[in-house]
Image: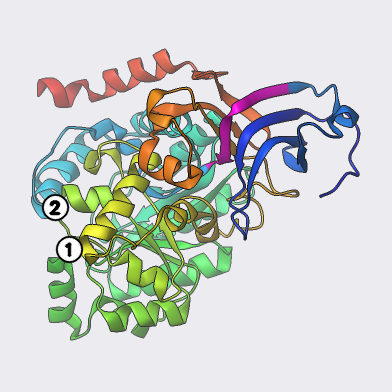
Amino acid sequence: MSRENTRTPDLIIKAGILLTMNHGLEVLRDTVVVVSKGRIVDILPEDRDQVSYEPAKEVLDASGHMVLPGLVNAHTHAAMTLFRGYADDLPLKQWLFDKIFPAEARLLSPESVFWGAMLGFAEMISTGTTCFMDGYFFQDQTLLAAMEVGIRGLAAQGVIDFPAPGVPDPAKNLEVGEAFLKEWAGASQLVRPGLFCHSPVTCSEETLGEAMEICERYEVPLQIHLSETQDEVNEIEAKTGKRPVFYLDELGLLKSTLVAAHAVHLDENEIERIAETGVRLVHVPESNMKLASGAARVWWMTQAGVLVGLGTDGSASNNNLDLFQEMDMAAKLAKVSSGNPEALDARTTLRMATIWGSYLLGLQDEIGSIEVGKKADLVVLDLDAPHLQPVYDPFSLVVYSASGGDVRDVVVEGRILYKNREFVDLDLEEIKAKVREFTRPLKTGE
Ligand SMILES: [Zn+2]
């Protein structure tokens, strides 16, 4: 561990229990994390040497509490907080085509997407997520909201071969997408632009192929929804004679820069092909359960060597963005669907929500674990709550006992965004009032 930097650090975090999520999943007790210019410059025992770093400009005292890497929500649609609870308990097709698409056509504007995304990012920060992977429309607004909040992530412009919010002419969907990448590449240290093809059913062969080419040119991942329902698989099979993964293979899309969410209905051959080609998957268990889409065979995927991240989906199908709850559900759903209580153990599940998720954004050298040289993106979990005692196994505690409500403090790139359960800079009341204002037409039927 480096001891070179002995000048006054920007931030010192005192951790009772430090879950590093490094390669060996090391757990350190009574530790000090030293942060300078947004990066972790040292990690050392609390009773030794820290005098060389005092006084720090700021100290976050989490003695007696747990510090872990900020969570990575690898599949979400932040602005869909606007539709939280608007349409529940429906089959996916009816939910999407009869309720969500018409509501989006009615409500979405640059302003409503900005405030919906602000609410989404405020929720993510307050529940321990420090990095997101998002796909939606009017994504310049999602990027601006993320920059305003100070969260890290990737906001991808939605591509669909139907008239869409902000893109009334589907013939221009890729033109709009490329212009978005051009405008926002390099605009922010924390937030990058990307593209998001809605699905192999709602995008043509040409659209999918060209979207991948554009993403390769701009060196950004291409996101897609894949095999979320059996209907989708049937539709692709009827159209192409192939299962969806082999259809995408034929189009040249199976690359490590493809990030496919859901992947509920993959057979063994498809999982094997995904593993061979290095495609990354995102497990979205709560949304899949709520829409009765099924249970992705995530245990087999991880056993086959596929890198799998964890996502909440939008809050219209979840209905929150709490990744702690998502971890709990993921681990339990894997057990019930495989009939094996050893499937998706707590350590694997926490890897999905941290270090594995970071690979999906190409940020594995920067975030996802607490190690010297990495960015200081971390979360303090308050261990005072009765349901978080005693601590036998900290991984089990995080996955099976904690929820987002136990998050006390959140740091992104060395900056404290959330302290003692309050936002340092954000005006949450303003955000909530704006969302109430923008969602009023749906509530009153005006
Ligand atoms: Zn989604």
Residue 358 part of the magenta-drawn span: no
Q: Are marks 2 and 1 in contact (CB under 8 Å)?
A: yes
Image quarter of residue 317: top left
Which residue is the site of mark 1?
229
Which one is in front, 119 or 17? Answer: 17
**Location of residue 102 with respect to 364 vertically, above or below:** above
Counting from the top left corner in percent of width and height, residue 400 is at: 36, 43
Structural distance between the alpha carbons of marks 2 and 1: 8 Å
Counting from the top left corner in percent of width and height, residue 167 is at: 32, 49
Residue at 21% from the left image edge and 40% from the top image edge? 105
Counting from the top left corner in percent of width and height, residue 8 is at: 87, 28
**Location of residue 443 with respect to 36 vertically, above or below:** above
Q: Which mark is residue 30?
A: none
Q: Is residue 123 visible?
A: no
Question: Is residue 273 toward the left or the right of residue 441 in the image?
Answer: right
Q: Is residue 350 visible?
A: yes
Question: Is residue 369 toward the left or the right of residue 347 in the image?
Answer: right
Task: Identify the amino acid type marked 2.
Answer: Leu
Question: Is residue 149 toward the left or the right of residue 81 in the image?
Answer: right
Task: Identify the amino acid type marked 1.
Answer: Thr
- Main SS, magenta residues: strand
First in sequence, mark 2 or 1: give its number. Answer: 2
**Location of residue 239 with respect to 289 vertically, above or below:** below
Residue at 12% from the left image edge and 67% from the top image edge? 231
Magenta range: 59-70
Which one is in front, 43 or 287? Answer: 43
Q: Which mark is residue 92?
A: 2
Residue at 34% from the left image edge and 72% from the top image edge? 300
Question: Is residue 225 toward the left or the right of residue 416 in the image?
Answer: left
Question: What's the image's color scheme?
Answer: rainbow
